[in-house]
Image (cartoon, rainbow, N blue to C red):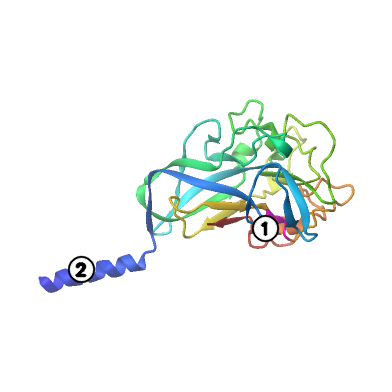
Amino acid sequence: MKSIKTLSATVLALALLASPAISMAHGETEIRFVGQVNGQPFECGKSYADVGTSKSMITPSDFRMFISDVRLIDGQGNAIPLQLTQDKTWQIDNVALIDFENGTSHCRNGTAPLNQSVRGTVPHGDYKGIEFTLGVPFALNHGDPTIAPAPLSSTAMFWNWQGGYKFLKFDMATTGQSKTTLPADKQGGGNASGFSVHLGSTVCASASKTTPPGSCKNPNRVTVRFDSFDPAKDVVIADIGAVLANANVDVNTPKTAVGCMSFPNDPDCPPIMKAFGLPYDGQPGGVQQFFRKQ
């Protein structure tokens, strides 16, 4: 009997060593996000040096993004959905708006409240990792924001019914592209920006900009997975400096959108879309550089 107990203890110990699962999520869970520019905390009105290939000085004026389909990875590799708390302010269905700007200083087109986490519940269990998507699911992406519940009511984060929402909105003045002198846009438009990064679906098949499409050729949603992640200890870093590392933010190609707004045939977009890990104009995507665990 003693030898059986010893064997059982040995098997259990080996099993624990073999499983990297972290006992970390029981019921209510919060996934925290931190906005950064080249490793420095994002702050409205602050200027950041050495950005992009031109080593430009940038001053951001907006930094918001939609996160959806958050799932925790259990010890068997199963992705278990995080059921979001339906606060109808920052979270609805399986979508959450992360808002790093506070409506002050250069972020005058934004709003005062901040939201830097996704909150919800998962079944009790042991989990070791996480995956999530940067973007709004197609089923929720092409409705009418004027009648949608928050946070999908944000017209600042919306293009039109055809294109849907801006999955990410980052606006800035740069050394070579100063901000405009136009009045602040209360709807959060990009008219205060010298260079913008707006990520969203493009080439969406519909009769007009006010007609929801049946599909989009370029969904431009980014799914991210960290095989090891403990919400109690780890945070998700969203560093726009890594996205801009191979872009020249001091130059905007004439007759194209300001910066890169995901639209095809924009010479300013390839290094930015590649850094998101997305294919663009027939070129394959790279390894996403925007998110990392810390």
Q: Amino acid at mark 2?
A: Ser
Disc sitting over residue 242 in the figure: 1
Of badges 1 and 2, nearer the viewer stands 1
Q: Position of residue 182 (x, y in %)?
A: 84, 33
Seen in the picture, residue 198 relative to 49 is either above or below; the reply is above
Camera-side residue of 109 and 81: 109
Residue interval drawn in magenta: 241-245
Q: Of helix, strand and loop, which one carries label 2?
A: helix
Camera-side residue of 236 and 211: 236
Camera-side residue of 32 and 200: 32
Residue located at (51% from left, 53% from top): 131
> What residue did someone put label 2 on?
8
User: Quadrant of the rendered structure where residue 89 is?
Assistant: top right
- Lateral position of residue 55 relative to residue 233, left or right: right
Q: Of helix, strand and loop, which one carries label 1?
A: helix
Residue that extends furthest to the left in the rendered view of this protein: 1
Q: Position of residue 60 (x, y in %)?
A: 72, 45
Asked whether residue 280 is in view, the answer is no
Seen in the picture, residue 194 relative to 91 is either above or below; the reply is below
- Lateral position of residue 31 relative to residue 201, left or right: left
Q: CA distance from mark 1 to mark 2?
A: 49 Å
Q: Position of residue 98 (x, y in %)?
A: 59, 41
Q: Amino acid at mark 1?
A: Ala
Q: Position of residue 251 (x, y in %)?
A: 85, 53
Residue located at (63% from left, 43% from top): 65
Is the magenta region chiefly helix, strand or loop? helix
